[in-house]
Image: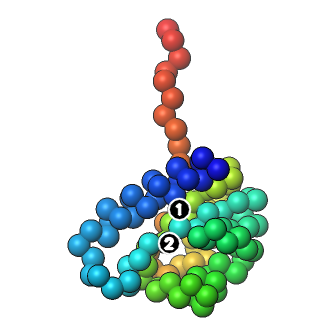
Amino acid sequence: MIVRSLIALIVCTVISVRLLGASPDHANAATLVEVIANGERCVVKGKEFNCKAIAKYLRERMRVPLTASIGVADGDHVDSDVLQRIVAELKQAGFTDVHALRLGFIAEPPPK
């Protein structure tokens, strides 16, 4: 749960910086899609569902504009190929600003 919160915080910060200077309308609102269960399940704003329905869910249920920033994040040690597949599906559905996000931790180097 801490990792999910950290991912959401980082993504929101990065996307917020990208949107500085954007118009006050919601045409560029940011959305985070968290991928779990190796690409079978996606979580958006706390709701979990099948990733195959992600584009339809964002477009029809959440009414996310096609120009909105969408981050596709690894929420459960998901393969990079899986993230790229979901990014490609969203782009194919017409979303124009979709990016795979990977979270990594920097550790101290081992002692010499």
Q: Is residue 5 left or right of residue 76?
A: left
| Residue wearing tag 2 | 31
User: Callout 2 environment at 10 Å: few (<14), some (14 to 19), or many (20+)?
Assistant: many
Residue kind at label 2, given as amino acid type: Thr
Tag 1: amino acid = Ala
SS category of the residue bearing label 1? strand
Q: How many marks?
A: 2
x, y percent for residue 45? 59, 70
At x 56%, y 84%, the residue is: 62
* Quarter residue 92 falls in: bottom right
Residue occupied by mark 1? 100
Residue 12 higher or lower than 25, as above or below: above
Q: Is residue 37 visible?
A: yes
Q: Residue most toward the top? A: 112
Which residue is found at the position 60% from the left and 47% from the top?
Answer: 2
Query: Which circle's residue, 1 or 2, is located before the other in the chain?
Result: 2
Element class at badge 2: strand
Front residue (pair 98, 43): 43
Q: Give the residue drawn at x 38%, y 79%.
A: 28
Horizontal side of residue 95 vs 58, given as left or right: left
